[in-house]
Amino acid sequence: MKEEFKAYISIHLAVILFGFTAILGAVITLPAMILVWWRVMIAGIGLTFFLRDFHFLRTISRLQLLRFIGIGSIISIHWVLFFLSVKLAGASVCLVCMATTCLFVSFIEPILLRKTFRKLDIGIALLIVPGMAMVVQSLEVSRYPGVLAGLSSAFLAAIFSTLNKKYIRNITIWQLSWIEMWSAFLTLSLILIISIPLVGAWEWWPASTDWVYLLILGFVCTTLGHAMSLYALKSISAFALNLVINLEPVYGMVLAALMLGENKTLAPGFYVGATLIILSVFSYPIIQKRLAHAIS
């Protein structure tokens, strides 16, 4: 119970950092893919200083290493879609889209972990659907591409969080984070090199005002936040973790209102739908606890 309590504290602190991530994505002037490229490189450098000893690369199997590299590649695309959603639809909309992650996890986790489907998990996750419908209906059509990017990002988040849960064995949180950050960096580097002849030169170098934001995004929101979420994943399920992560819109929308003034551009229906999504998060542990007492 003590470890589980620590895990929930860890993931709540990580969610605060994740909520601030969307705000940084809105103010950084770089395109989404270049932004993520810098983010994972800075995070990888930070993790390298944390680790220093890399003998663990000799002790893990080649198959395990390839799995983590693959998960890191998924994470890189997830983040690109996340920041693309921020830039196309706004931080608040992107964060609400990310709240659908548990909807995807409720179906993906039983399949990948070979567990039985839990009616409670699916039932709570489905409560998100009407809330998401209200959010979409309240938005201008011009923001729909951002919604699609956000939902796609949520789908990939469900996949990589479940895979991390499945394979996080015989390796520390920092070691796993290091592998995933650098594999994300290499994945995006390859994509950018291939795409340059197709779309022309990219604006690689950040503006002077972007550097502080990138350092906070890379070292604090990414390195620390990612490691804290992995720590929590060792003691709680991927579904429970993503339900807590659904609180990210709460922190993010408050920050977006205070720092970006997004509350002035969003219709009341958006916040009604967002409230329905957030209520599903709070209802899960309450119902789960009551069912446990009823069974006992």
Image: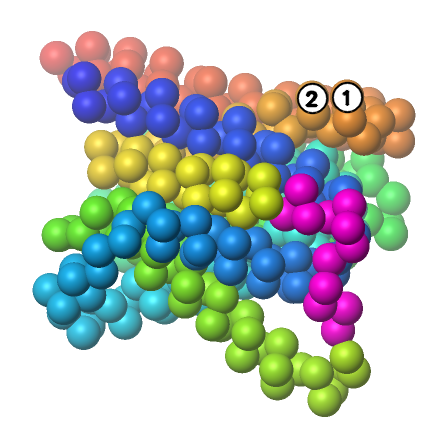
Left or right of residue 179: residue 283: right
**Quadrant where the N terminus is found in the figure:** top left
Q: Quadrant of residue 116?
A: top left
Instruction: Decide if residue 128 is in sight here.
Output: no
Instruction: Using the image as rendered, state which of residue 266 and residue 55 is in the foreground.
Output: 55
Left or right of residue 270: residue 80: left
Q: Which amino acid type is marked by label 1?
A: Leu
Read off the residue under disc 1.
258
**Quadrant where the C terminus is found in the figure:** top left
Q: Residue at x 46, y 18 (%)?
A: 282
Task: Please tell me whether mark 2 or mark 1 is closer to you in this view.
Answer: 1
Query: Label 1 crowding class (10 Å Cα cut-off): few <14, some 14-19, many 20+?
Result: few
Q: CA distance from mark 2 to mark 1?
A: 6 Å
Disc 1, SS: helix
Instruction: Decide if residue 280 is in sight here.
Output: yes
Q: Main secondary structure of the magenta part?
A: loop
Measured as percent of width and height from the top left, residue 280 is found at 50, 24
Read off the residue under disc 2.
254
Q: Are marks 2 and 1 in contact (CB under 8 Å)?
A: yes
Measured as percent of width and height from the top left, residue 264 is found at 88, 25
The region drawn magenta spans 202-214
